């Protein structure tokens, strides 16, 4: 099963944006799925992850602003982002956690100040 991120764009600081992670097959009972991001000149980091049962984890930098969920029927893992900051500017990816598969092209999120 491959995971593909989409939904990025340009948004002003303080705004909201929703990303979508679409699976090529069923994600029912599969392990953690995570949203990651990589800003220019920085390493890729885990932003949030969700278990097959819906248990979530968030990086401190996005806690309270980002919400990850999982729809096992639609095979999607949305990431809702609010109160966006310029520091959130990055390419966002979705992938398995902790054993990531080959990385796709991701989706660009740009937050203007």
Image (cartoon, helix red, strand yellow):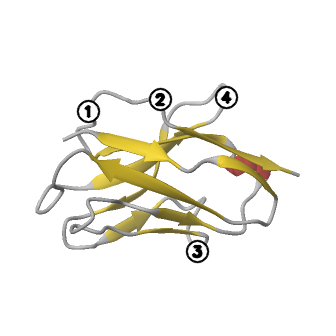
Contact? badges 2 and 4 (CB < 8 Å): no
In the image, is residue 78 above or below residue 4?
A: below
* Local secondary structure at mark 3: loop
Return the mark for residue 101: 1
At x 24%, y 44%, the residue is: 24
Return the mark for residue 14: none
Contact? badges 2 and 3 (CB < 8 Å): no
Residue 3, position in %: x, y? 31, 43
Q: CA distance from mark 3 to mark 4?
A: 24 Å
Return the mark for residue 105: 2
Q: CA distance from mark 4 to mark 1?
A: 22 Å
Q: CA distance from mark 1 to mark 3?
A: 28 Å
Task: State which mark lies toward you, 1 or 3.
Answer: 1
Q: Quadrant of residue 32?
A: bottom left
Of callouts 4 and 1, the N-terminal one: 4
- Of 77 and 45, which appears nearest the observer? 77
């Amino acid at each position: 099963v491959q995971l593909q991120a989409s939904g990025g764009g340009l948004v002003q600081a303080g705004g909201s944006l929703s990303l979508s992670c679409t699976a090529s097959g069923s994600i029912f009972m599969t392990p953690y799925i995570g949203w990651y991001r990589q800003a220019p000149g920085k390493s890729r980091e885990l932003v949030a992850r969700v278990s097959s049962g819906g248990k979530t984890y968030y990086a401190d930098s996005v806690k309270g602003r980002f919400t990850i969920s999982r729809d096992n029927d639609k095979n999607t893992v949305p990431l809702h982002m609010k109160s966006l900051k310029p520091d959130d500017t990055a390419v966002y990816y979705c992938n398995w956690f902790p054993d990531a598969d080959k990385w796709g092209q991701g989706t660009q999120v740009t937050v203007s100040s």
